[in-house]
Image (tube, grey):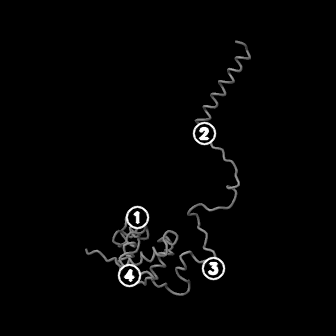
Amino acid sequence: MSLVTRLILVILVATTLLGVVMLFTYDIIKLEWVSFMEIQPSYKPMDKPLPVAANSIPIEGAAYIPGMGDPVNPVPADEISIERGRILYSVNCAMCHGPNGEGDGVVGGALINRPANLTGDVTQSKSDGTLFLTLSNGIEGKMPALNENLSVRDRWDLVNFMRTLEPTQP
């Protein structure tokens, strides 16, 4: 074998080995390429949602008008509304407020600020509009706002269901 042939063979083997090593390190060493999408201002999901534009009205219509008092419940508390509210409650609320609404949910027990007892006089004495606003806006440091996750109708159905909650007997 001539010297040139040996040199070509060594270069070929070295290139093949380097290629195999690069294949195995692809997931470890990643090169970031700058693209125009990465240098524009943007928001990640659940990262400080932008406020609603001034003078805008949601597609469903205005849920309530600030400064005009508590809204009036437009949804009758019929079987359909209460059943929808029960389903929504089991998905969105029961983990903190408990299956019977007594503030003893699985997640609620681990929180520093214990969730409200929805069957108690304090909650049940509030107007439907107050409960709706609490669901919509949340309580800072205690309960998240549900206005982005639930439609206006969903929140009224939850209010109607909350009215059916009664304390369990000891």
Q: Is residue 107 left or right of residue 52?
A: left
Q: Which mark is residue 55?
A: 3
Which one is nearer the viewer's eye here, 165 or 77? 77
- Label 1 SS: loop
Closer to the chain start, of discs 1 and 3, is 3
Q: CA distance from mark 1 to mark 3?
A: 38 Å
Which one is nearer the viewer's eye here, 59 or 123? 59
Crowding at mark 2 (Cα within 10 Å: few <14, some 14-19, many 20+) = few
Closer to the chain start, of discs 3 and 2, is 2
Task: Check disc 3 and give the amino acid type.
Answer: Asn
* Residue 106 seen from this side: yes
Closer to the chain start, of discs 2 and 4, is 2
* Residue 117 seen from this side: no
- Label 2 SS: loop
Task: Indicate whether 69 appears above or below 17.
Answer: below
Crowding at mark 1 (Cα within 10 Å: few <14, some 14-19, many 20+) = some
Camera-near label (4 vs 3) is 3
Give how far across and how far down residue 125 sits, in percent.
Answer: 39, 84
Q: Disc 2 marks which residue? A: 26
Given contact means CB atoms under 8 Å apart, are the residues at marks 1 and 4 in contact? no
Task: Check disc 2 and give the amino acid type.
Answer: Tyr
Camera-near label (1 vs 3) is 3
Given contact means CB atoms under 8 Å apart, are the residues at marks 1 and 2 in contact? no
Camera-near label (1 vs 2) is 2
Q: Disc 4 marks which residue? A: 124
Give how far across and how far down residue 143 sits, in percent.
Answer: 47, 71
Q: Disc 1 marks which residue? A: 107
Q: CA distance from mark 1 to mark 4?
A: 22 Å
